[in-house]
Image: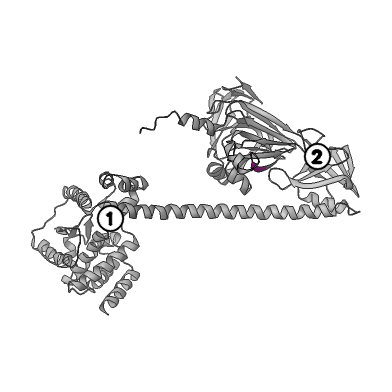
């Protein structure tokens, strides 16, 4: 069982081939198609408490769907709602990943998805909200992005500054602090970047090349107000 | 001490390997299965807290430029135990303090998040109440009366109301005597009686008060009827049903009332929200209507205790399961606290 990303880029989709008895966990509503050997079941992954936390705090759906090859081997196609690429995160060796709210698309293996509260400064200024998704366990997680995905590799001792609207996922060993984008508040505001996130290695960060909030604001500028 | 799981980042790499950390006095051993990957003297370790949670232990090995990341706080104990020369003791203590600080900060974060949520809910309620008050001021009594007329016309389709029967004339006489005590009231109070086997009375927005005939049969004298009518007049002049309807209609209708043309469109929208069958007043509104009722009864020379004697007689009947009075108590909850408040108000006004 593994994920294969087809049509990588703006119209990416994942294909999962399942042997009989195997299953894939996916965001509710993300299934495109499936073999008739595969059954669909809505599940409150991790029980009611975790489901409510994810739904209320993490910006994710209340239920995940579990697609299981019940009566024979089968195939499932899964795609995100937004145009953009899909990043596969292989999990094992004790490494954990954080996903921005709404980035979870699917998972195979023994993966647990929970919400984690950020530090107050991160919550107030990162633009990611108070809670982010935390993936632990062994397997593969598929994260959806808006636009293409760009990976940043950060060995220990190296830092990188990221505009928070472009964050998709980051490994749990990276450190993360909020700071001004430029020297001095005036420069920070006039540069249009505001506050940014400083990540420190070791670890990896995955960015989306388009910022959904900025795209939404751009669309809104063309919508007639009715005045 | 048992080995502790960790992740090892080779020099210049962002890819981790799962390893186990084992200790000998003064030495850290990095194992992968049974294989020794590398080892380092404890004096070559630089220890700090980090990772996304801020709670992970990060060990930078100065000699080999490797980095180890560990989630298990037990590593501090293991380091302290293996550190026979005491070269790491200061760093271990600093890491313990930093971990406690992170814990306190997380707790503070939860408390603040809870506080913000409570404040937001409180602001929402307080804000809606303030909006309703502003909206009520923008809706003139004439519009409220038109709204009431529409509601009453709808009610009359299914119910027969009389203003000319001897009973209706009795109610009109008592009601007008009470209404005469209102100075500068914008409402033209109208009274009618509906033949019914139920004991009840209600006020329609704008000043129409309807009394069900069984209430007149239950009342022993005019003072008791005056008590009930004065209470209903209290609801009318307090604009209680309009306030309830605005609360039900929500923020949008309130804003239309505040910023719209003389509250007209809001009043039209409100007609969907005033439901006589579902009309329930808040405890505060009932108490306010009681206070107005006592005052009007006294001013019109009725015995204000009439309302109390009427309530108490009905409560006895309710206790015996008399079906005719049950409806009265579902729309007019009478509590001992309310009766006490009425008594206090009477005592206050009489002295």
Tell me the quarter of the picture where residue A46 sits.
Answer: top right
Q: Sequence order check: which comes first, mark 1 or mark 2?
A: 2
Residue in view at x 71 percent, y 34 percent: A204
Give the x, y percent position of residue A179: 65, 43
Residue drawn 69% across the image and 52% down it: B102
Pick the residue in front: B182 or A103.
B182
Say which mark, if any, is on residue B200. none
Side of B97 where B295 appears, left or right: left
Measuring from the top left, give residue A7's x and y in whole percent: 60, 19
Is there any visible trace of residue A85 in the rendered image? yes
On the question of residue A116 being in view, the answer is no
x, y percentage for residue A87?
A: 64, 28
Count of numbered tags: 2
**Label 1 belongs to which residue?**
B241
Q: What quarter of the picture does the C terminus of chain A occupy? A: top left
Residue that label 2 marks:
B67
Tell me the subunit letter for badge 1: B
Asked whether residue B277 is drawn in magenta, I would say: no
Query: Which range is magenta?
Result: A177-181
Tell me if residue B130 comes above or below residue A194 in the rendering: below
């Amino acid at each position: 069982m593994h994920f294969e990303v087809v049509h990588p880029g703006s119209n990416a989709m994942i294909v999962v081939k399942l042997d009989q008895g195997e299953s894939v966990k996916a965001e509710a509503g993300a299934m495109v198609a499936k073999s008739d050997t595969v059954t669909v079941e809505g599940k409150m992954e991790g029980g009611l408490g975790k489901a409510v936390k994810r739904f209320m705090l993490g910006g994710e759906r209340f239920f995940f769907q579990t697609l299981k090859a019940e009566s024979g081997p089968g195939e499932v196609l899964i795609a995100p709602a937004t145009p953009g690429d899909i990043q596969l995160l292989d999990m094992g060796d004790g490494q954990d990943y954080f996903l921005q709210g709404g980035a979870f698309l699917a998972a195979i293996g023994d993966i647990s998805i929970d919400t984690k509260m950020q530090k107050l400064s991160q919550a107030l200024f990162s633009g990611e909200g108070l809670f982010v998704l935390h993936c632990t366990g062994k397997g593969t997680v598929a994260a959806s992005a808006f636009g293409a995905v760009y990976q940043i590799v950060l060995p220990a001792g190296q830092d990188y500054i990221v505009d928070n609207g472009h964050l998709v996922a980051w490994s749990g060993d990276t450190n993360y602090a909020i700071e001004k984008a430029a020297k001095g508040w005036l420069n920070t505001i006039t540069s249009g970047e505001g506050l940014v996130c400083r990540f420190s290695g070791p670890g990896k960060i995955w960015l989306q090349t388009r910022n959904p909030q900025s795209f939404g604001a751009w669309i809104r500028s063309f919508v007639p107000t009715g005045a | 001490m048992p080995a502790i799981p960790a992740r090892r980042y080779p020099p210049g790499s962002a890819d981790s390997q799962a390893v186990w950390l084992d200790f000998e006095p003064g030495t850290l051993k990095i194992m992968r299965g049974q294989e020794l990957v590398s080892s380092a003297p404890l004096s070559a370790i630089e220890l700090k807290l980090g990772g996304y949670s801020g709670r992970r232990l990060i060990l930078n090995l100065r000699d080999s430029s490797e980095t180890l990341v560990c989630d298990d706080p037990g590593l501090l104990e293991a380091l302290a135990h293996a550190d026979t020369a005491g070269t790491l003791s200061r760093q271990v203590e600093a890491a313990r303090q930093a971990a406690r600080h992170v814990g306190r900060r997380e707790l503070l974060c939860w408390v603040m998040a809870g506080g913000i949520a409570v404040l937001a809910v409180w602001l929402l309620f307080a804000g809606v109440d303030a909006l309703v008050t502003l909206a009520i001021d923008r809706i003139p009594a004439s519009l409220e009366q038109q709204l009431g007329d529409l509601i009453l016309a709808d009610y009359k389709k299914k119910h027969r109301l009389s203003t000319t029967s001897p009973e209706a004339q009795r109610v009109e006489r008592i009601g007008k005597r009470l209404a005469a005590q209102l100075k500068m009231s914008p409402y033209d109070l109208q009274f009618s009686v509906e033949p019914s086997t139920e004991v009840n009375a209600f006020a329609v927005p704008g000043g129409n008060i309807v009394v069900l005939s069984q209430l007149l049969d239950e009342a022993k004298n005019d003072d008791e009827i005056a008590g009930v009518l004065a209470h209903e007049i209290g609801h009318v002049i307090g604009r209680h049903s309009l306030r309830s309807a605005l609360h039900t209609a929500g923020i949008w209708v309130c804003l239309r009332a505040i910023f719209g043309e003389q509250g007209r469109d809001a009043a039209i929208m409100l007609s969907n929200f005033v439901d006589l069958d579902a009309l329930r007043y808040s405890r505060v509104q009932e108490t306010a209507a009681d206070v107005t009722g006592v005052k009007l009864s006294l001013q019109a020379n009725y015995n204000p205790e009439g309302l109390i004697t009427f309530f108490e007689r009905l409560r006895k009947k309710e206790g015996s399961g008399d079906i005719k009075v049950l409806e009265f108590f579902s729309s007019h909850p009478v509590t001992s606290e309310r009766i006490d408040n009425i008594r206090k108000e009477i005592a206050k006004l009489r002295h």
